[in-house]
Image (cartoon, helix red, strand yellow):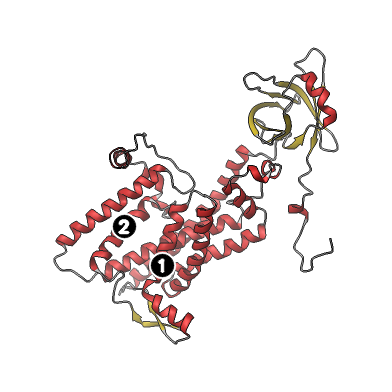
């Protein structure tokens, strides 16, 4: 199969002028409002926070969909909040109105090759830069980190579908690298000669991502669906040729993506420079966001905390637990940071507690909920990793030993890759 450079597309897609006008307007508006941070200079937050858009979203919600809530800007994953869906509806309506007005004033214009070129560039860069960002995030395992100890000690039946999916991906760094490399190959979309190959690779990747988002209820359904549709848009002029080659074994040539003819050397150098500058900026922002992601995770899960870890109360400590007066249902203590503790009961239901840790005095306070008794105690870590609490808020000091759950020697850590399955 050859890529016939002489067979440059002289016909736009969709070939129907009215459909093309609608497609052009819809894609441009969507990429501006839902670019997911892909277009660095057009981050979605400022655009989506435009007062006029927020007012419009509320009007649509109240008057068209009879939704009497006050819609606010929300950012869940890469969208999918009520605000985003109402905004998508607005984009659809604006595209339809724009198509009508455009068709009225088009005056028989049917040649949109230049606009088609612009549209393919927008879509190629939208997908390509986004895939680079997601790929780098996986290479550094910042999107799918290894499961936190709270996840590891929680029973499977308590997990939300998305938590289960993130646990699966995060458990294998090798799998992260593989997926990361495949997504970074989206860079092929930024070069006209390799754009078709890039679209094919990205289509397969995006279909997998979309399926995960749908069936594990991950709130990135809108953008992942757009990635699939945009890849199909890029491949549309060659669908029949690809089918003939892949399914019928016929020799064929591909229609090349439209090209911008620039006569001056300065112009060509400028366009190439902008392309590589966008790539460098995207990579730089992705690498810097890795550090930001680490800081965000550490705010909720800080391995540097002295008490960090998962612990449980053994049956032999039941008497001391009763003397202290804390809830009989407390079983597991999962210390997340110096300010956050999660306690699981015997049914593995988790409750957040605020704690205050004084590292100098080696003291910890567990702030009780209404109707409960808290703990103010000194703490000491034994050689076995257990934590020994000695109460300060009781008439006589009472000790309570928290037994460490060893999460460093679990199969997810210790079982390495091997070609031959050993006898069990």
Closest to the observer: 224 or 423? 423
Residue highlighted by disc 1: 232
The residue carrying pointer 2 sits among few (fewer than 14), some (14 to 19) or many (20 or more) residues within 10 Å by Cα, namely many
State the image coordinates of residue 95 (x, y, percent, origin top left): 27, 55
| Location of residue 382 (image quadrant) | top right
Q: Please say if 216 is above or below 331.
A: below
Question: Residue at point 56% right, 45% down?
Answer: 292
| Location of residue 345 (image quadrant) | top right
Marks 2 and 1, the one that precedes in the sequence: 2
Where, quadrant-wise, is the C terminus in this rendering? bottom right
In three-dimensional space, the C-alpha distance between marks 2 and 1, rounded to whole angstroms, equals 15 Å
Q: Is residue 274 visible?
A: no
State the image coordinates of residue 363 (x, y, percent, origin top left): 74, 24
Q: Is residue 387 visible?
A: yes
Question: Residue at point 77% right, 34% down?
Answer: 312
Under circle 1, the secondary element is helix
State the image coordinates of residue 281 (x, y, percent, origin top left): 47, 56
**Does residue 236 appear left or right of residue 143 in this picture?**
left
Q: Please say if 202 is above or below 36.
A: below
The residue carrying pointer 1 sits among few (fewer than 14), some (14 to 19) or many (20 or more) residues within 10 Å by Cα, namely some
**Does residue 60 appear left or right of residue 78 in this picture?**
left
Residue highlighted by disc 2: 26
Under circle 2, the secondary element is helix
Q: Please say if 226 is above or below 76.
A: below
State the image coordinates of residue 369 (x, y, percent, origin top left): 63, 22
Question: Residue at point 23% right, 58% down?
Answer: 99
- Residue 244 - label: none
């Amino acid at each position: 199969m050859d890529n016939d450079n002489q067979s440059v597309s002289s016909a736009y897609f969709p070939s129907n002028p009215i459909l093309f006008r609608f497609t052009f307007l819809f894609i441009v508006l969507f990429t501006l409002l839902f670019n997911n941070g892909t277009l660095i200079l057009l981050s979605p937050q400022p655009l989506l926070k435009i007062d006029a858009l927020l007012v419009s979203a509320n009007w649509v919600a109240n008057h068209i969909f009879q939704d009497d809530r006050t819609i606010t800007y929300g950012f869940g994953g890469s969208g999918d909040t009520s605000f985003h869906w109402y905004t998508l509806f607005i984009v659809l309506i604006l595209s339809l109105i724009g198509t009508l007005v455009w068709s009225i004033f088009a005056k028989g214009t049917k040649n949109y090759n230049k606009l088609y070129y612009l549209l393919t560039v927008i879509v190629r860069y939208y997908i390509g830069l986004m895939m680079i960002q997601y790929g780098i995030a996986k290479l550094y395992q910042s999107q799918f980190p290894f499961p936190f100890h709270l996840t590891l000690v929680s029973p499977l039946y308590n997990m939300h579908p998305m938590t289960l999916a993130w646990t699966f991906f995060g458990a294998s760094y090798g799998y992260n690298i593989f997926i990361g490399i495949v997504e970074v190959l989206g860079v092929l979309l930024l070069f006209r000669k390799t754009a078709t190959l890039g679209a094919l690779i990205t289509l397969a990747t995006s279909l997998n991502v979309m399926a995960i988002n749908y069936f594990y209820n991950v709130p990135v359904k809108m953008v992942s669906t757009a990635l699939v549709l945009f890849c199909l848009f890029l491949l549309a002029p060659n669908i029949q040729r690809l089918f003939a080659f892949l399914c019928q074994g016929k020799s064929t040539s591909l229609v090349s993506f439209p090209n911008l003819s620039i006569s001056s050397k300065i112009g060509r150098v400028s366009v190439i420079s902008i392309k590589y500058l966008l790539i460098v900026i995207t990579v730089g922002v992705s690498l810097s966001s890795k550090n930001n992601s680490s800081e965000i995770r550490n705010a909720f899960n800080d391995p540097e905390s002295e008490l960090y870890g998962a612990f449980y109360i053994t049956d032999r400590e039941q008497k001391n637990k009763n003397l202290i007066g804390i809830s009989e249902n407390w079983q597991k203590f999962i210390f997340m940071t110096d300010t956050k503790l999660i306690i699981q009961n015997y049914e593995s239901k988790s409750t957040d507690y605020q704690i205050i840790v004084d590292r100098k005095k080696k003291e910890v306070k567990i702030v009780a909920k209404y109707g409960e008794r808290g703990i103010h105690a000194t703490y000491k870590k034994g050689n076995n990793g257990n934590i020994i609490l000695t109460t300060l808020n009781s008439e006589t000091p009472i000790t309570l030993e928290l037994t460490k759950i060893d999460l460093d020697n679990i199969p997810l850590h210790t079982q390495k890759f091997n070609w031959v399955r050993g006898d069990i």
